[in-house]
Amino acid sequence: MNEGEAEIYKEKDWKDLEPNYAIKIFLTVLYSLILLTGIVGNGVTIQVMQVLQHNGYMQKYVTDHLVSLACSDLLVLLIGMPVELYSATWFPFTSTSGDASCKIYNFLFEACSYATILNVATLSFERYMAICHPFRFKALAGERTGCLIALAWVTSVFVAIPLLFTTGMEGHVIEPDVGPVQNLTFCTNLRERWGVYRASIFVAFILYIVVLVSVGVMCRGMILVLQKTMRPMGGGVNGAEGTPKHESARVKAAKKQTILFLVETPLWAIPLIDSTRHMLKQTILKCYDHSND
């Protein structure tokens, strides 16, 4: 980094943003548990999906979606957790990575995080079509699943591209009244592109809300259809008769749907914990920076 790019501060105490030793230990244990749980959980998910598909208990399009979801989740954990633990918890202001590696890290982390979210959305869409619009679902069979998964990953890449231009290494020279001069460098959003970074975060947040609302609407639609399906129908000896045989398949689909969303929930929650902390760290640093200008 050029000397002219470093900024000089006399009154800022950047150490106030660094957690104390006890918190560092706690975060290390917590991150390690999340990382271990995520690796084991997603690894087991991939293996179980393959076994279920091989034995005919799960359709291929469902396993494809869940495997894609598990892979994006694993990438978030493997890329995000170690780097965040090192650079944000233990050594927040002494980053040794170069500008290129900083940009690539932020880009990959954001892309994989949104791939996880969009994989949940595409799987929910497939299940919604299968339950609420079964005839259209069959008509759209074929390469639909592969196209949806590819669309999720491509969209995630495009959402993350702005971070290649709005993040990088920033240097700050601290000249305290007492004590030696401190040279601080860290990987964050660039000061001169704060407006563009803020806009990209806003767009990404809107996309997240749209996906969240869409999944909620689809879940509500599926619940309503399945409630009607499992409701007893009249016509028997005592005016009531059990569900017809042709409805049993839809009842089984309801059970499978419940299992699928139970599997999805932890897979989605784990990377969001890390991505939320990552975004908060970047925002707090920049807001602290602006407040002391």
Image (cartoon, rainbow, N blue to C red):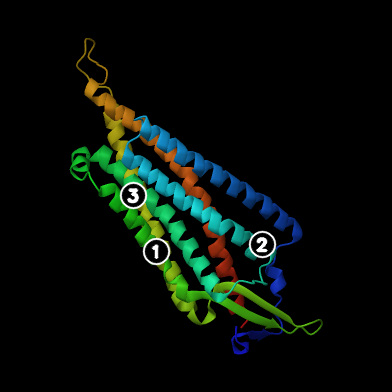
The crowding category of the residue bearing disc 1, from other C-alpha atoms within 10 Å (few below 14, some 14 to 19, many at least 20), is some
Pointer 1 residue: 157
Please say if 72 is above or below 191: above
Residue 25 lies left or right of residue 163; in this view the side is right
Q: Which residue is mark 3?
A: 122
Q: Amino acid at mark 3?
A: Thr
**SS label for mark 1:** helix
Sequence-wise, which precedes: disc 2 or disc 3?
2
Observer-nearest of 178 and 155: 155
Residue 32, label in figure: none
Residue at image mark 2: 89
The residue depicted at 45 percent of the width and 41 percent of the height is: 46
What residue appears at the point 64 percent right and 72 percent down from the top-left corner? 96
Q: Amino acid at mark 1?
A: Val
Nearer-N-terminus badge (3/1): 3
Q: Nearer the viewer, residue 252 or 44?
A: 44
Secondary element under disc 2, as helix, strand or loop, is helix
Q: How many marks?
A: 3
